[in-house]
């Protein structure tokens, strides 16, 4: 059912009262009409909901863009958490090696969000010692309370020998002290292992795990190529010098079992959750592993067939992707997902979900 034109006034009115902008470039069209008739709740399931750009004539779109561009955004922030550096271990640290800078790692996404008015609300989170170009580095964050859980213990310096749990513990406290305690909301965008760090922070606070802060004001969570149920065994098996973090991303590890079955089994107060997976992702391997993360929608790209890196670099705004999706993580291993054509590309999906409020 196509109701975009009729709903334009309602969307515009909602935009005036919203805390953040929404995508106003190329129209986002969720599916051909015949698909929507078969699944009338598809727009909500696919996550755009009230943030979707209406399909209308040039005058309507120009007016909507004018309204959105006039909004003041000051209470919602987007946090970007990077993934694993498989070769940054203690030996690499002692040899003076430096992990890729945060701003370089996220350059495409930062540009995409900045071009849409969100530059001052973007925060990049470093997870390794000596990592530069970050708004904050978790290696320098001191939690208000220590945790008694073994999976939350850190190491110094922060390398790939540091527990993912320790990173999530520090991230939770940093979010709480700088945003939640001040009534400010955030969305988390995690790539690869960074998604597991984000899930640990949100789930640990929600479940009041040992040493964690109260529940966080996290509105949205977007996970890009995150191995929620384990990374590819062939990928992990080909790495040398990657200890703790690689072991924790093995399917069936104590860490993943705890994360998926105890800490982050539900929404944890997060309104918008989306897992994006590339069908050519050599790290995640099985797209179902990427889909198995908390609750919410999981979406994988049939075309473009993103690999592990370019899923976070595609700034294209043409809605020409082919996707499959699940609306709940438990479906990943039991149901073949419905397919949709003519969908947005990866950074457009990321933007729409991360800025939804």
Image: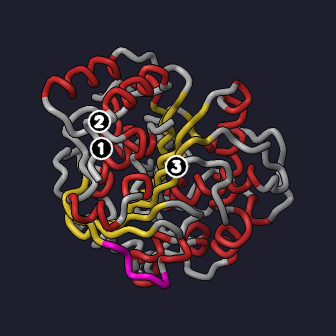
Can residue 285 be seen in this snapshot? Answer: no
| Residue contact between numbered discs 1 and 2, judged by CB atoms under 8 Å | yes
Where 91 falls versus 238 (above or below)?
above
**How far across and how far down the image is residue 39, in percent?**
36, 64
Secondary element under disc 1, as helix, strand or loop, is loop
Precedes in sequence: disc 1 or disc 3: 1
Name the disc covering residue 6, or none.
2
| Image point (44%, 48%), residue name | 98
Occupied quadrant, residue 27? top left
Q: Nearer the viewer, mark 1 or mark 3?
A: 1
In front: 18, or 348? Answer: 18
Within 10 angstroms of label 3, few (less than 14), some, or many (20 or more) residues? many
Q: Is residue 105 magenta?
A: no
The residue labelled by disc 3 is: 272
Question: Magenta-highlighted stretch: main secondary structure?
Answer: loop
How far is the residue under mark 1 from the one under mark 2?
5 Å
Name the disc covering residue 3, or none.
1
Q: Nearer the viewer, mark 3 or mark 2?
A: 2
Left or right: 186 as drawn, with respect to 265: left
Magenta-highlighted residues: 333-338
| Image point (41%, 72%), residue name | 284
Within 10 angstroms of label 1, few (less than 14), some, or many (20 or more) residues? few
In front: 30, or 112? Answer: 30
| Image point (61%, 63%), residue name | 161
**How far across and how far down the image is residue 348, in percent?**
30, 45
Residue furthest to the left: 58
**How far across and how far down the image is residue 316, in percent?**
19, 46
| Residue contact between numbered discs 1 and 3, judged by CB atoms under 8 Å | no
Left or right: 62 as drawn, with respect to 64: left
| Image point (66%, 48%), residue name | 269
Secondary element under disc 2, as helix, strand or loop, is loop
How far is the residue under mark 3 from the one under mark 2?
25 Å
């Amino acid at each position: 059912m196509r109701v975009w034109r009729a709903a334009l006034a309602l969307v515009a009115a909602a935009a005036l009262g919203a805390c953040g902008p929404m995508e106003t470039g190329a129209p986002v069209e969720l599916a051909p009409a015949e698909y929507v008739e078969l699944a009338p709740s598809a727009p909500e399931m696919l996550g755009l909901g009230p943030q979707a750009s209406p399909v209308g004539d040039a005058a309507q779109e120009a007016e909507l863009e004018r309204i959105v561009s006039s909004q003041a955004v000051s209470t919602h922030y987007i946090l970007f958490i990077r993934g694993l550096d498989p070769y940054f271990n203690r030996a690499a640290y002692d040899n003076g090696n430096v992990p890729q800078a945060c701003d370089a790692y996220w350059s495409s996404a930062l540009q995409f969000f900045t071009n849409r008015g969100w530059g001052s609300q973007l925060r990049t989170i470093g997870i390794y010692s000596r990592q530069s170009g970050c708004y904050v580095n978790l290696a320098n964050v001191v939690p208000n309370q220590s945790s008694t859980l073994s999976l939350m213990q850190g190491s110094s310096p922060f390398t790939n020998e540091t527990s993912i749990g320790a990173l999530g513990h520090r991230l939770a406290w940093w979010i709480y002290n700088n945003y939640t305690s001040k009534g400010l909301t955030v969305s988390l965008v995690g790539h690869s292992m960074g998604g597991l760090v984000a899930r640990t922070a949100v789930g640990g606070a929600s479940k009041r795990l040992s040493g964690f802060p109260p529940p966080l004001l996290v509105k949205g969570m977007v996970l890009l190529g995150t191995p929620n149920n384990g990374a590819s065994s062939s990928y992990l098996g080909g790495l040398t010098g990657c200890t703790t973090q690689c072991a924790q991303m093995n399917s069936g590890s104590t860490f993943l079992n705890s994360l998926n079955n105890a800490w982050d089994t539900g929404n944890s107060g997060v309104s918008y959750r989306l897992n994006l997976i590339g069908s050519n992702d050599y790290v995640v391997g099985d797209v179902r592993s990427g889909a198995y993360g908390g609750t919410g929608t999981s979406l994988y790209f049939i075309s473009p067939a993103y690999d592990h890196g370019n899923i976070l670099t595609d700034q294209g705004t043409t809605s020409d992707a082919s996707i499959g999706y699940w609306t709940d993580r438990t479906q990943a291993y039991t149901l073949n997902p419905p397919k949709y054509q003519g969908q947005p590309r990866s950074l457009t999906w990321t933007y729409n979900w991360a800025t939804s409020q």
